[in-house]
Amino acid sequence: MTDGILLIDKPEGITSFDVVARVRRLFGTKQVGHTGTLDPLATGLLVVLVGRAVKASELLIEKDKEYIAGLRLGITTDTEDITGSVLTRSESLPAREEVAAAAGQFIGELLQTPPMYSALKVGGKKLVDLARQGITVERTPRPVTIRSLEILGGEGPDYQIRVSCSKGTYIRTLLADIGKALGCGGTMYALRRTRAGSCSVQDAHTLAEIEAMPADARQTLLSPTESLFEEYPRVMLPAFFERLARCGCEIYQKKIGTAYPEGTRLRMYGEAGFFALGEVRVYPDGTAENADMRIIPCSISSQEKVNDFKPTPKDADGAQALLARLDQLNAQFEKAFSKTGVSAVSPYPTEWKYAY
């Protein structure tokens, strides 16, 4: 099966979904996604996930991104980019030093109001669909972080700006806000994504290049999924603990000889290689408990001879017999897993407890 990460240098004029559709055709699989939409106006890096790699999309969306954007001063539009209808114009333009000073005020954490022309939903409807109907609704400002903001060049109305930012940042809104702070207004006339997490547009290929390759050559462009998480520590799990992890069980660091701080994400490897990401969690008393779990003795059916799939609580005698049987199973369970430290708390109602 085809799995991995494909870096695409998206051209102007097509959507991110257009890219996904073409990659599906080229690699012969429906399992294709990406880690962050680029508007048709934008070019540059689109991280495309193929096969089982699509499961990592939510984690990759969290990565910081870097852009080179074009800011045109003296004009505002309804879409906050050059494709929209002009709302205002100004002939009074600031000097480059003033532009740099105004832009610098946006470095750091800030609240950004999403633009009406966006795919965000309010009340189940996309903002862009409402905007096209001439409807404007209130949007809740969202926290974003501008890591760095650098004026690369330009004078007069047009400037080129490099921006490093957190997920969810609307660059066109950022540029519009800079123009507003300068008093002359501004809109985005170009946008190129140059980096997403550890991925760089310098390592990307154009769709035309990929389409010109033989099918076997295209496969060599796919990077392993784990290559996107190289900043996370690597943990090799013994076979027993690999089986537990694959079943969704928590694994205590003491048992595998690690001591990473809380919140650390880990690349988890087994005999066959990378298979999952893990995260370190800390419990106040050193145990993981689910005190809300309760056992209600039931039969699986309300009828004795036919399973009608209606679990029914047992009467007093039946409940006592079932609980006695569960006690026996607990004893067997603890004996079988005594070396792992897994135990069960009695009497019932029960809570499962991992005591390390």
Image: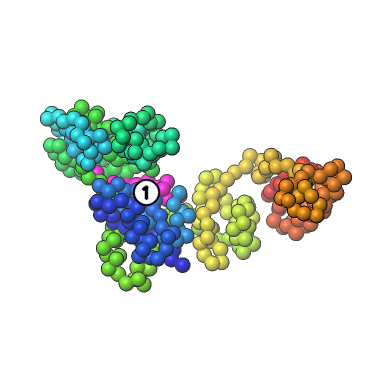
Q: Is residue 339 left or right of residue 54?
A: right
Q: Is residue 201 visible?
A: no
Is 9 in front, or is 28? 28
Q: Amino acid at mark 1?
A: Gly
User: Residue 283 appears at what percent x and percent y?
Assistant: 62, 42
Residue at (52, 45) in percent of width and height: 263
Q: x%, y% of residue 161?
A: 23, 42
Which residue does the image show at 56% across and 66% down from the upper left?
A: 271
Q: Find residue 167 and report its image quarter.
A: top left
Percent x, y of residue 105: 29, 32
Neighbour tally class for label 1: few under 14, some 14-19, many 20 plus, Cα within 10 Å: many
**Looking at the image, residue 274 lies above or below residue 82:** below
Picture quarter containing residue 73?
top left
Q: Residue at x 39, y 51 (%)?
A: 35
Image: magenta residue range: 59-71
In this figure, which colouring scheme has been used for the structure? rainbow
289 within the magenta span: no
Circle 1 is placed at which residue position? 36
Residue 139 located left or right of residue 181 = right
- Residue at 36% from the left image edge and 41% from the top image edge: 119
Picture mark count: 1
Is label 1 in a helix, a strand or a loop?
loop
Q: Observer-nearest residue: 265 or 59? A: 59
Q: Nearer the viewer, residue 342 or 41?
A: 41
Tell which residue pokes out farthest to the right in this image.
Answer: 317
Position of residue 354 measured from the top left corner of the image (x, y, whole percent): 69, 48
> As displayed, is residue 220 above or below residue 189?
below
- Above or below, comparing residue 83 to residue 60 in the picture: above
Q: Is 247 positioned to the left or the right of 199 in the image?
A: right
Asked whether, in this view, residue 77 is left or right of residue 276, the answer is left
Is 67 magenta? The answer is: yes
Residue 149 in sight from this viewpoint: yes
